[in-house]
Each structure stands twice: as C-alpha cells, then as structure tokens.
Amino acid sequence: MTLKKTDAKSQLKSNLGQKIAITVFNDRISARFDCFHRMIILTYDPPSQQYQRQELTIMDMSPYEKINLLEELNIDTLICGGMLPICDGYLALKGVKTISWITGNAEEVIQLYLDGKLTPTQGRGNTRGKNE
C-alpha cells in the first residue's frame, strides 16, 4: 500500500490491541526517522500473541506529516533508528511511545519486540504512551 499526503486517514483499523510501527529501509531499520519511506505496521494482541501485519510506502511527507500520520493511524509504539529530539517530543505529545536508536534487520527486530527482548541501543526514546 502506498500513501501520499492526502490518502492516509485511518486506513489501518483492527479489533486487535496494540499498534506498532517500524520504520524500514530495504530490509533494515531505517537509520533516521525523518528519512524513512517504508513502514511495517503490526496490530498486536499480547494475550493471544496474534498479530496482523501491513506494509506502507510513505512518499512526499515531511517529518511532521509522518508524525501526524502515526497519530491518524492510532500507532501506540514506534520502533525506529535515530530521531531528532524535537520529533521525539512531538510524538510524545501525540501519545506515541518511541523505541529509538534501534539498528539491525527489521524482521529480527520485530521478533525481539514480540518476544519482549527489544531494548534501545543507546537507551533513548520517550516512554510516554497513550495510557500514561
């Protein structure tokens, strides 16, 4: 699915629980939040360990538009590489928890997250989610 500025409104809805967005470049976590063009979205229900997966291609969006898109898609947690403090602050204001400064193969990172073993490389990222 490819999204442009005008057609992103709430395209991912589900009856499952938590929504996690992972920024990707090729098969790895995108090195910088403001430069990603592809995103994997998992809608995950921890008790049942079931999840739905969708991939989006994001074109022609500024970092602020990407932040607004994450809010529109009701993302709870963002997993990404490097992030400017101002972007992290805006995401916190929007209720999106970030796990930033993550590196590596996207599929391996997803599995680490689902297994509860993912930790930020440098301990950065906001910890204020929607319910905090």
Image (cartoon, rainbow, N blue to C red):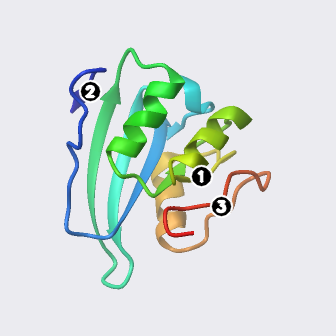
Query: In the image shown, does 97 or 45 lie closer to the viewer?
Result: 97
Q: Position of residue 33 (x, y in %)?
A: 57, 33
Q: Position of residue 89 (x, y in %)?
A: 66, 42
**Residue 3 badge:** 2
**10 Å crowding of disc 1: few (<14), some (14-19), many (20+):** many
**Residue marked by disc 1:** 98
Residue type indicated by callout 2? Leu
Residue type indicated by callout 3? Thr
Q: Is residue 36 visible?
A: no
**Is there a contact, CB below 8 Å, between mark 1 and mark 2?**
no
Distance of label 1 from label 2 (alpha carbons): 22 Å
Residue type indicated by callout 1? Thr
Q: What is the quadrant of residue 123 in the picture?
A: bottom right
Count up the numbered dots: 3
**Residue marked by disc 3:** 127
Q: Position of residue 117 (x, y in %)?
A: 61, 71
Q: What is the quadrant of residue 69 in the picture?
A: top left
Q: Earlier in the sequence, mark 3 or mark 2?
A: 2
Q: Earlier in the sequence, mark 3 or mark 1?
A: 1
